[in-house]
Image (cartoon, grey):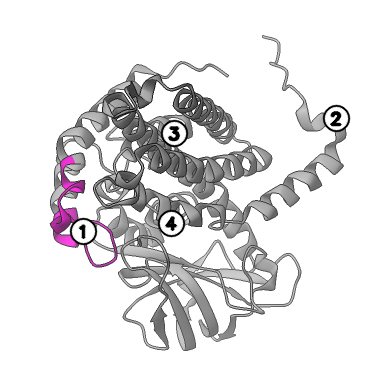
Amino acid sequence: MNFEISPIVEDFRARIARFVERELLPLESERSSYDEHGNITLELLAAMRARAHAEGLWTLQLPRSARPTIGRVGMAVCYEEMNRSIFGPACFNSAAPDDGNMMLLDRVATPEQKERWLTPIEDGRVKSAFAMTEPHPGGGSDPSMIQTRAVKNGDTYVVHGRKWFITGAGEASHFIVVARTSDDARHGLTAFLFHKDQPGWRIVRRIGIMGPEEHGGHCELEFDGLEIPVENVLMGEGQGMKITQIRLGPARLTHCMRWLGLSKRSVEIAMEYAAERHGFGVRLADRESIQMMLGDLAMDIEIGRLLVMKAAWELDRGGFGRKEVSMAKVHVANLLHKAADTAIQINGARGYSTDTVLEWIYRYARQARLVDGADEVHKMVLNRQLEAEGRSFWRWDVEKAA
């Protein structure tokens, strides 16, 4: 692959960088910028979103005729820059779960479904959620275990079951729920669209977590007779497993893109402190131990960027990128935790305090090894591909002759 980015992508990257530096970083040091769950307040978010929209930096992940298409490779560059700030993704409308939901709907929804369900999310008028994960014995990383059922009754499906850890559900208006419509091993799941105001479902609780939360939290849902008309089925009955595959692969990768930004920010804070802090007559930055810590992080971040870029390139050329995405997901998730932990160690008590965003990043980072598939699941998937492909697992794709 060519590691040069286009002038169009560079223009977006530079403009995003200026916006983050000018508009967002100053907000992080103001306690009034945070809501009770450690995220940017909704009032401040609305103001920042309006500014990002006015500067043409809004929802860049969706291909639109009114602006250049940047593809997954361009998204990797831009998302990394956006998440130099902990507030960045939400302000540019590139935060999960809306990000993955919009890309899914843009790809598979009918024109009528896009108008009703996608456009309001794209415009920033509503939030959305993807309801797949269930408590035991239901489906988690393995969607084939999903227990929630949707029974067809004429032109309507009636849904019963439970979901949990549904990100953003507390603020969402538009939902995608995956439910079982038959016991067929491959075509037993179906994806549905529904609105928060429809009867027959409720939020049981907002589940407390150790880290800062996305707007709307992580909720447990109960479905007790939710009726969904047949026109709100995505891709047709029995296509739910395919829906999860289409959505989760790119969504895992966009997580990695954003996490690289937070990893770089952690290093940035550590370097600034090490350059000015003295101990025993020596700057921290001049100590070999600190230099090795930062050099090691720099290398791991670059490895993560290469893994993400290869996966993005594979998706852009029409491939599935399953093993590329899994490798990126495992590496970058662990990198984020390592970067935050190392930066805190270099900053000492300052890093453990709320004087920097390092403690925020550290608490947030622990979920990275769990969301969208735990490390062990992705490694298991990689082993299965290794067993199936043998030495071809590491094959080089040969360019076709002209």
Q: In the rendered structure, which disc, 4 or 3, sits on the residue that comes first in sequence?
A: 3
Q: In the rendered structure, which disc, 1 or 2, sits on the residue that comes first in sequence?
A: 1
- Residue 131 percent location from the top left of the image: 49, 69
Which residue appears at 77% of the width and 28% of the height? Answer: 394
Marks 2 and 3 sit apart, C-alpha to C-alpha, by 29 Å
Q: Which label sits in the foreground, 4 or 2?
A: 2
Range covered by the magenta-colored residues: 26-46
Q: How many marks?
A: 4
Q: Which mark is residue 101?
A: 4
Which residue appears at 29% of the width and 65% of the height? Answer: 37
Residue position marked by numbered label 3 in the rendering? 76
Amino acid type assigned to the residue bearing label 1 in the image? Tyr
Residue position marked by numbered label 1 in the rendering? 34
Vertical position of residue 362 compared to residue 147: above or below = above
Amino acid type assigned to the residue bearing label 2 in the image? Arg
Of residues 176 and 233, which is closer to you in this image?
A: 176
Determine whether the residue tagged by mark 3 lies in a helix, strand or loop: helix
Query: Dots 1 and 3: beta carbons under 8 Å?
Result: no
Of residues 400 and 391, which is closer to you in this image?
A: 391
Marks 1 and 3 sit apart, C-alpha to C-alpha, by 27 Å
Left-right relation of 363 to 11: right
Q: Which mark is residue 391?
A: 2
Marks 4 and 3 sit apart, C-alpha to C-alpha, by 18 Å
Marks 1 and 4 sit apart, C-alpha to C-alpha, by 25 Å
Q: In the rendered structure, which disc, 2 or 3, sits on the residue that comes first in sequence?
A: 3
- Residue 264 percent location from the top left of the image: 40, 33
